[in-house]
Image: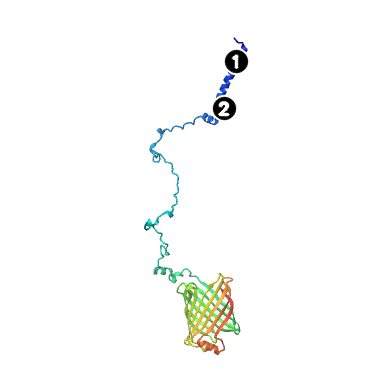
Amino acid sequence: MPSLPYRTLALSLGLALAGAAQAQGHDHSKMDHAAHQAAQKPPAKPAAAVDHSTMDHSKMDHAGMGDTKPAAPETKPAPMDHSQMDHSQMDHSRMTQAKPATSEPREPIPQPTDADRAAAFAPISLHMQHAPEFNHYVLINRLEAVDAEHGNAQAWEGQAWFGNDTDRLWLRSEGEREDGRVESANLEALYGRAISPWWDVVVGAKHDLRPEHGQTWAAFGVQGMAPYKFEVAATAYIGEAGRTALNFEAEYELLLTNRLILQPLIEVDLYGRDDPQRGIGAGLSTVEAGLRLRYEVTRQFAPYLGVTWERAFGDTADYRRAAGEDNNDAQLVAGVRVWF
């Protein structure tokens, strides 16, 4: 029987061999710790059970319940290769063609009727009854210096009215002065009655102050704005001893800019009988044309430069030649235009 020390040594050797064998069976260097940890996670708790016994199925919409198919991926159609198509075998008669756009509107404007015209151009008594108050207007259309043949001269032409839009008193005057002496001058006083929004009928009297002794005429005519904004005045006169005369005047304002305005003018005089004392012949007597360019410093005040041309005809030209005057004359003018 061996002694105690040997028995203790043998027991220690046996325990050491048993520990080495166990260590060799569990090699932790070759273990997957991630998988081991995942395996060690506790299982997920099951969802709480739904108690269907307490639910009111009569109020639930079961139409949308069922097996839902996954949405198919959206695909774009492949472009067609027309180069490989045989168009000769295709029926093009059923293909629709776009209608060309027409120049006429879809809803043409109807033609105006007589009722439409009557509504647009109401009687003058109804058209202007909104402005019965008294007004006035004074215009000195020409106040100018003239480069005359025998020196400097002056000329004027103006008009004024007082009243309302339908009834007015018109005053008109024009004349010339040369070498400190008035060569011609007249004054007209007329009653004007509006017969349309653009035209007045006038009747009254005219008095010639010069030349020679004075003469009075009865006057009547029309004045206003013609189409295309031509200002027109036509007046007939009946004087002493059965003398008659007719004056026609037209002018136009062409706006070159907002302030620079070109104003052409033409005036024609005709007489029924010869008047040797005044150097006037029967028929077409004189024609005067003018062209004035003004600049409106203000709307009420505008200086201007221009040129005028006058020619005498018939017996009037003969009287002028007999007096040593030209029957054809062109002049430079400069003046101002004022209204208030």
Report the number of numbered marks: 2
Horizontal and vertical percent position of residue 303: 59, 74
Q: Are marks 1 and 2 in contact (CB under 8 Å)?
A: no
Residue at the spot x=60%, y=17% of the render? Answer: 13
- Check residue 28 in the rendering and tell me which mark sits there, or answer none: 2
Query: Residue reaching furthest bottom?
Result: 322
Task: State left or right for residue 325 relative to residue 272.
Answer: right
Q: Amino acid at mark 2?
A: His
Secondary structure, mark 1, is: helix
Locate the N terminus by quadrant. top right
Horizontal and vertical percent position of residue 299: 56, 71
How packed mark 2 is, by other alpha carbons closer than 10 Å (few <14, some 14-19, many 20 or more), is few
Locate the C terminus by quadrant. bottom right
Q: Amino acid at mark 1?
A: Ala
- Check residue 213 in the rendering and tell me which mark sits there, or answer none: none
Above or below — where is 52 with respect to 268?
above
Residue 340 visible in the picture: no
Question: Which of disc 2 and disc 1 is earlier in sequence?
Answer: 1
Above or below — where is 324 with respect to 203?
below
Q: Nearer the viewer, residue 169 or 87?
A: 87
Horizontal and vertical percent position of residue 25: 55, 24
Residue 30 visible in the picture: yes
Which of discs 1 and 2 lies nearer the camera? The answer is 1
Horizontal and vertical percent position of residue 304: 58, 75
Q: CA distance from mark 1 to mark 2?
A: 29 Å
Above or below — where is 238 with respect to 339?
below
**Circle 1 is placed at which residue position?**
10
Query: Residue reaching furthest right?
Result: 5
